[in-house]
Amino acid sequence: MCKGLVSLPACCLERAKELKARLGILLQKPICTLSCCKIGKNKPTLEECLKWKESFERLLSSRYGLCAFTAFLVSEFSEENIAFYFACEDYRRTKCPTKLLTKAQKIYSEFISSEAPREVNIDHETRDITKANLMNPSPSCFDQAQHRIYMLMAKDCYPRFLHSPVYRDLLCQAKPSTKLTNLPHLVKKV
């Protein structure tokens, strides 16, 4: 660490850590950019975009929905939530017990630790339980933290996404499927 930084107040050091983490994200390849939702024939249909309003789960289960939602989170500087959620999904599918410890430590140091570069917003109790779970890694050791982040996204980020310019632009650019073309009254409601 640079000697000049040591003499700075703790709040300045915390802000510097936060800025470093955010700038580091920009230097990495993004998980998904909105442009992946707009490439030629691969645009989502209007019908698919409208289904995302039905539930958060339906949004996440759609390749384009996930892409658009991730792009929205990037624009709000909260992409660590979706990255953590899918890191946990990947971890849960790990079959090899020796890989569980390595993956668990990586997820903890990247998302859970108070020094994590992409720290997710969870309460201290959940953080402590997760840390204790790492003593004996199992496929379920991140379940409580993952659930908290899922609920945060479902109750906070998802409603904001549905009212965002990102989602509205996708609705405007989406082409109606052949089913919706024959039902103009549905298209007008958008």
Image (spheres, helix red, strand yellow):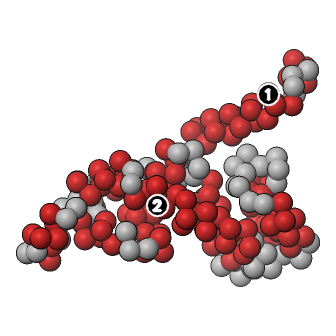
Q: Amino acid at mark 2?
A: Pro
- Residue 134 sits in which quadrant? bottom right
The percent coordinates of residue 66 (x first, y second) are 45, 63
Along the horizontal axis of the image, is 75 left or right of 116? left
Q: Residues within 10 Å of mark 2 (few under 14, many from 20)?
A: few
Task: Point out which mark residue 12 bears.
Answer: 1
As displayed, is residue 11 above or below residue 53? above
Point out the frontmost of discs 2 and 1.
2
Along the horizontal axis of the image, is 26 left or right of 67? right
Measure the C-alpha gap from mark 2 to mark 1. 33 Å
As displayed, is residue 76 above or below residue 50? above
Along the horizontal axis of the image, is 31 left or right of 179? right
Along the horizontal axis of the image, is 140 left or right of 7? left
- Which badge, 2 or 1, is on the more N-terminal residue? 1
Q: Amino acid at mark 1?
A: Cys
The C terminus: image quadrant: bottom left
Task: Point out which mark residue 159 bears.
Answer: 2
The percent coordinates of residue 167 (x first, y second) are 35, 55
Q: Residue at x 43, y 74 (%)?
A: 55
- Residue 150 sits in which quadrant? bottom right
